[in-house]
Amino acid sequence: MLLTAAAQQSPIGIWVMMGLFVVIFYFLIIRPQSKRQKEHKKMMEAIEKGDEVVTAGGMLGRVAKVTDNYLMINIADNVDISVQKHAVTATLPKGTLKSIKE
């Protein structure tokens, strides 16, 4: 009895279910990821000299110089490192570094 019911299922139902999976996949995975990418790109374009940033490696510092693809970050007195722009994960509010050092 169950075998005949499964064999008689219409192919339209399968296509509807596949379409539903695609829609769910889009709204749960693809759309949020592209939104995060746009926000990260916008943040990277807005970085300027004097901003306090965190790199992907966890280094905190103040931006000393900005070029097209790289940033010069001051992490301590007379210690500057050069990192790629996309390695910056977040910008910090002004004064964060000062509050951490105290």
Image (cartoon, grey):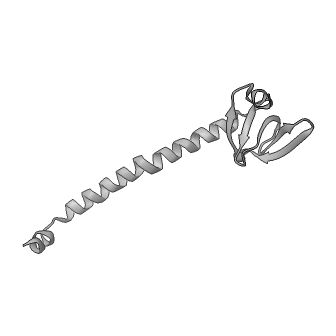
Q: Residue at the spot x=71%, y=47% of the render? A: 87
Q: Residue furthest top?
A: 95
Note whether 75 is above or below 15 in the view shown: above
How many numbered circles does the render carry?
0
Q: Quadrant of the C terminus?
A: top right
Q: For this rendering, which residue is in front, 69 or 51?
A: 51
Note whether 27 is above or below 3 in the view shown: above
Q: Where is residue 88 shown, x and y percent of the image?
A: 71, 43
Q: Residue furthest left?
A: 1
Q: Quadrant of residue 67?
A: top right
Position of residue 102 in the picture relative to residue 42 (left or right)? right
Position of residue 32 in the picture relative to residue 20 (left or right)? right
Q: Quadrant of residue 16?
A: bottom left
Q: For this rendering, which residue is in front, 5 or 94?
A: 94
Q: Residue at the spot x=63%, y=41% of the render? A: 41
Q: Residue at the spot x=87%, y=37% of the render? A: 76
Q: Quadrant of residue 58?
A: top right
Q: Residue at the spot x=42%, y=48% of the render? A: 28
Q: Where is residue 82 shown, x and y percent of the image?
A: 83, 46
Q: Residue furthest front?
A: 102
Note whether 79 is above or below 52 in the view shown: below
Q: Where is residue 23 shown, x and y percent of the image?
A: 35, 50
Q: Quadrant of the N terminus?
A: bottom left
Q: Where is residue 3 shown, x and y percent of the image?
A: 12, 74
